[in-house]
Amino acid sequence: MAKLRRWGRELLILLLMVLAVVSVMDWLNAPQAPPAFDVQPLATLAGESVSLAQLSRERPLLVYFWASWCGVCRFTTPDVARLQAEGGNVLTVALRSGDDGQVAQWLARKRLALPVVNDPRGALSAQWQIGVTPTFVVISQGKVVQSTSGWTSYWGMKLRLWWAAV
């Protein structure tokens, strides 16, 4: 019993250390929202003009910065597409992944249906100071409430959106 208790305590310490490191990394890699980002019109591949304020007015919005060349994004993008297909409020930004046609072809090859704003030269991502792909930003009522970068799970995304709505 004492051995089990010691293992449990060591596991708890390890988990707390991992949580601390992840939190510090998120803080260091946190994107910086540009001035008036919420009203800036963005054009999707589908030809819609949207704003982050409009999309986040009723419920929290997950903005997903990704790239077709990003290795981690190959694992997270299908989860983002699943979240969106299940009714999640999602907008994605394709960073330096080619022109609109190339991004659309990449999505078609992967059988993914996502609302995408193409950022072929990285100008939008530079405004946000995105340094890591993938980066996830949660916006509620036009304000950034949370962000993380790197791999996150489908349930992690759902939890972040739920937490922002509470």
Image (tube, rainbow, N blue to C red):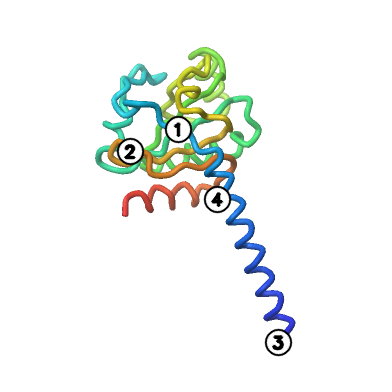
Q: Secondary structure at mark 2?
A: strand
Residue 37 % position (x, y)? 35, 27
Tell me the CA gap for discs 2 and 1: 12 Å
The amino acid at mark 3 is Met
Front one among 95 and 85? 95
Q: Residue at x 25, y 38 (%)?
A: 57
Q: Which mark is residue 143?
A: 2
Tell me the CA gap for discs 1 and 3: 49 Å
Q: Residue at x 32, y 41 (%)?
A: 140
Cβ atoms under marks 2 and 3 closer than 8 Å = no
Q: Which mark is residue 23?
A: 4
Q: Secondary structure at mark 1?
A: loop
The amino acid at mark 2 is Lys
Tell me the CA gap for discs 2 and 3: 49 Å
Q: Nearer the viewer, mark 4 or mark 3?
A: 4
Q: Which mark is residue 93?
A: none
The amino acid at mark 4 is Ser
The answer to whether one can see residue 111 in this image is: no
Categorize mark 1 by other alpha carbons within 10 Å: few (<14), some (14-19), many (20+). Answer: some
Q: Nearer the viewer, mark 1 or mark 3?
A: 1
Q: Residue at x 60, y 39 (%)?
A: 75
Residue 113 % position (x, y)? 45, 30
